[in-house]
Image: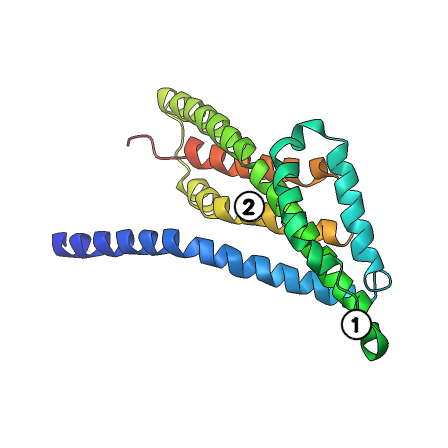
C-alpha cells in the first residue's frame, strides 16, 4: 500500500505539471478556432453583407471603449500600435477580376482587429478575477471555520464538483466574451460580471466545503 501511494503521487505531480505547461497552447488553439468560426459566420452572410457587419462590430467596439475612460490608457496605446502595423492590411484593395474578394478580405481584417481588442479587454479584466478569487477564498474560509466550530456536516461532493468546475467557469467566460460580441453588440458588464460571479461562487464553494482538518 505505501508503494502504491508513492507511485501515485509522482504521477499526479507530473499530470499537474503537464497541464500547466499545455494550457497556453490550448488557449491559443481555442482562440484560433473562435477566429475561424467568426470569419465563417461573417462570410456566410447571415448577419449582413460580408465585410459590412464586421466593420460595424469593430466601430461599435471602439465607440464603447471611448465611453470608458479607464479602459483607454494602455489598451488604446497597444491597440494603436497594432493598428499602425496592420494599416497595410486594412488598405489592401483588389481590382479587376479579383474585386469580388474585397469584402471577404475586409471581413478577415476587421474580425481579427475586433478579436484582438476583446482579448486585450479580457486581459485587462484579469485583476478583477484575482480580486474575486481572494474575496471568495477568504469568505469560504470563514464559512469553513464556522462549520468546524459548529461540527457541521462535511460535503466532499460539493467540494469535488466545485473544484472541477472552476477552470470550466473561467474558460466559459472567456469563450462567451470572445465569441458573442462578434455576432451581436453586447455590453461588457453583461458578459464579464456573470462570469466573475460564477467563478467566485465555485471558489467559495470549493473552499467552504473542504474537509474539516487539513
Query: Which disc number belongs to residue 204?
Result: none
**Which residue: 61% across, 51% down?**
175
Query: Which disc number belongs to residue 169?
Result: 2
Q: Quadrant of residue 60?
A: top right
**Which residue: 22% across, 51% down?**
9
Which residue, given by chain and number where applicable, does mark 1 sit on? 101
Spot occupied by residue 174 in the image (x, y as percentages of width and height): 59, 47
* Nearer-N-terminus badge (2/1): 1
- The vertical placement of 109 against 164, above or below, is below
Q: Can residue 176 be seen from the camera position used here?
A: no
Q: Where, quadrant-wise, is the N terminus in this rendering?
A: bottom left
How packed mark 2 is, by other alpha carbons closer than 10 Å (few <14, some 14-19, many 20 or more), is many
In the rendered structure, the answer to whether residue 66 lies left or right of residue 22 reads right
- The vertical placement of 144 against 97, above or below, is above
Spot occupied by residue 139 in the image (x, y as percentages of width and height): 47, 24
What element does badge 1 sit on?
A: helix
Q: Can residue 57 be seen from the camera position used here?
A: yes
Q: Nearer the viewer, residue 70 or 195?
A: 70
Q: Where, quadrant-wise, is the C terminus in this rendering?
A: top left
- The vertical placement of 153 against 178, above or below, is above
How packed mark 1 is, by other alpha carbons closer than 10 Å (few <14, some 14-19, many 20 or more), is few
Q: Nearer the viewer, residue 166 or 27?
A: 27
Q: How is the image coloured?
A: rainbow
What element does badge 2 sit on?
A: helix
Q: Quadrant of residue 65?
A: top right
Q: CA distance from mark 2 to mark 1?
A: 39 Å
Spot occupied by residue 113 in the image (x, y as percentages of width and height): 68, 52
**Which residue: 44% across, 24% down?**
138
CB-based contact (under 8 Å), mark 2 and mark 1: no
Amino acid at each position: 500500500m505505501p508503494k502504491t501511494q508513492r507511485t501515485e503521487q509522482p504521477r499526479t505531480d507530473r499530470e499537474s505539471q503537464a497541464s500547466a505547461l499545455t494550457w497556453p497552447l490550448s488557449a491559443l488553439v481555442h482562440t484560433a478556432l473562435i477566429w475561424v468560426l467568426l470569419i465563417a459566420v461573417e462570410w456566410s452572410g447571415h448577419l449582413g453583407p460580408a465585410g459590412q457587419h464586421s466593420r460595424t462590430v469593430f466601430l461599435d467596439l471602439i465607440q464603447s471603449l471611448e465611453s470608458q475612460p479607464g479602459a483607454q490608457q494602455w489598451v488604446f496605446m497597444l491597440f494603436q500600435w497594432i493598428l499602425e502595423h496592420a494599416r497595410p492590411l486594412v488598405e489592401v484593395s483588389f481590382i479587376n477580376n479579383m474585386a469580388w474578394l474585397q469584402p471577404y478580405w475586409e471581413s478577415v481584417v476587421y474580425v481579427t482587429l475586433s478579436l484582438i481588442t476583446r482579448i486585450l479587454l479580457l486581459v485587462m479584466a484579469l485583476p478583477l478575477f484575482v480580486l474575486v478569487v481572494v474575496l471568495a477564498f477568504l469568505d469560504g474560509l470563514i464559512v469553513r471555520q464556522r462549520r468546524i466550530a459548529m461540527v457541521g456536516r462535511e460535503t466532499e461532493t460539493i467540494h469535488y464538483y466545485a473544484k472541477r468546475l472552476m477552470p470550466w467557469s473561467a474558460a466559459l467566460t472567456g469563450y462567451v466574451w470572445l465569441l458573442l460580441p462578434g455576432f451581436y453588440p453586447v455590453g461588457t458588464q453583461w458578459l464579464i460580471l456573470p462570469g466573475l460571479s460564477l467563478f467566485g461562487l465555485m471558489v467559495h464553494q470549493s473552499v467552504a466545503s473542504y474537509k474539516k482538518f487539513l
